């Protein structure tokens, strides 16, 4: 399965590290861009960095986590990066194990599985005390994370050279649909897990 990034679109990778773990973790969001020249793409990448660092806010992720930056990818490969490590300042509570993730639904308003997506976000804002033994997130914490996420997406939508926030599709279908505009993001109330072995 390969992601299709058509002309006029890009995929943003938001990169994080956890203290004691050398491997970066990430989530991705597709965007439509107004221009594909390199300076404009760099503007998009810079804007995405500012949208997360300011819109979500370093005070809303724990200090074991560092937001490393953003990598912007087009069909030809990586086009640019904005890498400015920003440690969290949201406290020192014990974070969840790193193969646990926050699940964020990407909703387009169109019916069908191919028009829905998900982000698997590292648990940057989740402490062990926030999640039950069945994986359910405390409702107050969930509401705060949704507010932070909405602020981040609002800032991203307003960033320079960002036309739309879009769901990119994969090449498993005979006819790959054009990217579909995402109309909302919904933070799920139960954590997910990544297919990543700890050893």
Image (cartoon, rainbow, N blue to C red):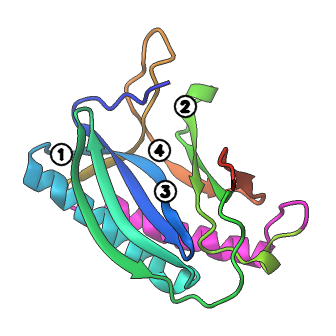
| The stretch drawn in magenta includes residue 47 | no
Mark 2 lies on a secondary structure that is: helix
Q: Earlier in the sequence, mark 4 or mark 3?
A: 3
Residue 26: numbered disc: 3
Percent from the top left, x then y, of residue 39? 8, 55
Residue at the disc numbered 4:
182
Residue farthest along the top direction in this orientation: 174
Q: Is residue 107 above or below residue 53?
A: above
Q: Is residue 60 above or below residue 185?
A: below
Residue at the disc numbered 1:
34
Label 3 packing within 10 angstroms: few (<14), some (14-19), many (20+): some
Percent from the top left, x then y, of residue 31? 34, 46
Residue farthest along the front direction in this orientation: 199
Left or right of residue 176: residue 107:
right
Label 4 packing within 10 angstroms: few (<14), some (14-19), many (20+): many
Q: Earlier in the sequence, mark 4 or mark 1?
A: 1
Q: CA distance from mark 4 to mark 2?
A: 9 Å
Label 1 packing within 10 angstroms: few (<14), some (14-19), many (20+): some
Mark 3 lies on a secondary structure that is: strand
Residue at the disc numbered 2:
115
Mark 4 lies on a secondary structure that is: loop
Q: CA distance from mark 4 to mark 1?
A: 17 Å
Does residue 57 show up?
yes
Give the residue displayed 28% in from the left and 29% down from the top.
6
Q: Which residues are magenta?
A: 133-160
| The stretch drawn in magenta includes residue 150 | yes
């Amino acid at each position: 399965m390969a992601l299709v990034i058509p002309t006029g679109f890009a995929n943003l990778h938001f990169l994080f590290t956890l203290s004691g773990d050398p491997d970066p973790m990430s989530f991705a969001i597709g965007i439509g861009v107004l221009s594909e020249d390199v300076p404009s793409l760099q503007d998009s990448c810079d804007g995405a960095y500012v949208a997360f660092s300011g819109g979500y806010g370093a005070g809303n992720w724990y200090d074991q986590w560092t937001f490393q930056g953003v990598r912007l990818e087009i069909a030809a490969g990586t086009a640019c990066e904005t890498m400015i490590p920003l440690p969290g300042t949201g406290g020192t509570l014990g974070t969840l194990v790193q193969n646990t993730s926050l699940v964020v639904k990407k909703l387009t308003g169109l019916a069908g599985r191919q028009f829905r997506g998900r982000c698997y976000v590292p648990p940057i804002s989740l402490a062990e005390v926030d999640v039950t033994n069945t994986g359910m997130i405390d409702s107050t914490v969930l509401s705060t994370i949704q507010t932070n996420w909405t602020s981040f997406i609002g800032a991203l939508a307003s960033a320079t050279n960002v036309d739309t926030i879009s769901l990119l599709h994969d090449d498993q279908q005979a006819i790959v649909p054009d990217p579909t505009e995402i109309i909302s993001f919904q933070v799920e109330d139960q954590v997910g897990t990544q297919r990543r072995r700890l050893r």
